[in-house]
Image (spheres, helix red, strand yellow):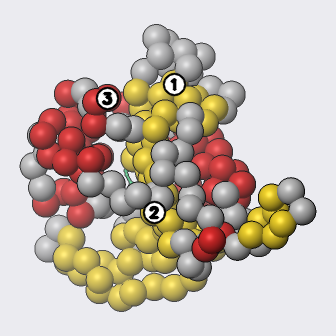
């Protein structure tokens, strides 16, 4: 339940802001990502096998047009930010990846996803962006975040641990991956 003046309002009565605003951390800007901002290097991230090898995006070929459609059709009330370094992190200011939060309004739960381009990993960008988005989601009344990924995705498992997500379940043999079947690990955290 959120509070506005003296009046208690339910999250389901509120329309979450259609556009998440810009969020800032010590080293990053999280910029609401719109079709007009698409650059060829964003598309290149998605066509880089290393970046998407644990994602269903690996089955697709991406173009500027497909990225425009993805952003233009992004569900209202859910959020996607471009993760951009402020210059202290990687000089000059650089686009590092994206972070998403798909909001289930009635249950006040957000399903999060993140991609940091291979070149910019291992410097704490994902953790910094993730915790800032969590903080934002809390301010709009979200009470839980969740995330699902392939059990073989070590980077995501480590990030999950680093941001305090807990394993809530395993869906055995969920994905066909590189000639074998791998499980989906489901993570969650009350915020
Ligand atoms: C998962 C991913 C977002 C991590 O990005 P990153 O910027 O390298 O992560 P960070 O540097 O913020 O690391 C966060 C923590 O995880 C650990 N970590 C991250 N990747 C790791 C790896 N491959 N092996 C071991 N530890 C790793 C870091 O050491 C750090 O731990 P600490 O805070 O205890 O020191 C990145 O590897 C990625 O984009 N992968 C491809 C897309 C994907 O799989 N997304 C997840 C599905 S939603």
Eye-nearest disc, 1 or 3: 3
In this orientation, which residue lies closer to the viewer: 189 or 16?
A: 16
Within-10-Å neighbours for mark 2: few <14, some 14–19, many 20+: some
Give residue 95's quadrant in the image.
top left
- The vertical placement of 110 against 95, above or below, is below
- The vertical placement of 19 against 167, above or below, is above
In this orientation, which residue lies closer to the viewer: 138 or 152?
A: 138
**Reading the chain from its start, which is encountered first: label 2 or label 3?**
3
In the rendered image, residue 133, in percent from the top left (x then y), is placed at 60, 49
- The vertical placement of 20 against 4, above or below, is above
In the displayed structure image, the side of residue 80 where residue 137 appears, left or right: right
In this orientation, which residue lies closer to the viewer: 142 or 42?
A: 142
- The vertical placement of 164 against 126, above or below, is below
In the displayed structure image, the side of residue 178 where residue 118 appears, left or right: right
Circle 3 sits in a helix, a strand or a loop, which is it? Answer: helix
**Reading the chain from its start, which is encountered first: label 2 or label 1?**
1
Labels 2 & 1 near each other (Cβ < 8 A): no
**Reading the chain from its start, which is encountered first: label 1 or label 3?**
3
In the displayed structure image, the side of residue 103 where residue 62 appears, left or right: left
Q: Which residue is mark 1?
A: 85
Q: Residue at x 29, y 83 (%)?
A: 174
Q: Residue at x 47, y 16 (%)?
A: 93
Q: Residue at x 58, y 79 (%)?
A: 107
In the rendered image, residue 144, in percent from the top left (x then y), is placed at 64, 71
Labels 1 & 3 near each other (Cβ < 8 A): no
Give residue 62's quadrant in the image.
top left
Q: Residue at x 66, y 32 (%)?
A: 25
Residue furthest to the bottom: 172
Q: Which residue is mark 2?
A: 102
In the rendered image, residue 155, in percent from the top left (x then y), is placed at 46, 54
Q: Which mark, by number, is residue 37? A: 3
């Amino acid at each position: 339940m959120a509070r506005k003046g003296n009046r208690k309002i339910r999250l389901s009565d509120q329309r979450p802001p259609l556009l998440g605003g810009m969020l800032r951390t010590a080293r990053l800007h999280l910029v609401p990502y719109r079709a007009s901002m698409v650059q060829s290097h964003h598309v290149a991230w998605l066509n880089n096998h290393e970046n998407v090898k644990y994602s269903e995006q690996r089955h697709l070929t991406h173009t500027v047009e497909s990225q425009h459609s993805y952003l233009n059709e992004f569900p209202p009330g859910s959020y996607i930010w471009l993760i951009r370094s402020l210059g202290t992190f990687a000089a000059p200011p650089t686009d590092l990846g994206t972070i998403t939060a798909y909001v289930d309004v009635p249950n006040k739960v957000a399903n999060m996803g993140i991609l940091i381009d291979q070149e910019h990993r291992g410097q704490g960008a994902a953790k910094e962006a993730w915790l800032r988005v969590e903080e934002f989601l809390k301010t709009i009344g979200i009470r839980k975040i969740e995330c699902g990924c392939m059990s073989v995705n070590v980077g995501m498992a480590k990030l999950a641990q680093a941001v305090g997500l807990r394993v809530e379940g395993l869906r055995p043999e969920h994905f066909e991956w590189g000639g074998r079947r791998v499980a989906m690990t489901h993570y969650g955290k009350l915020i």
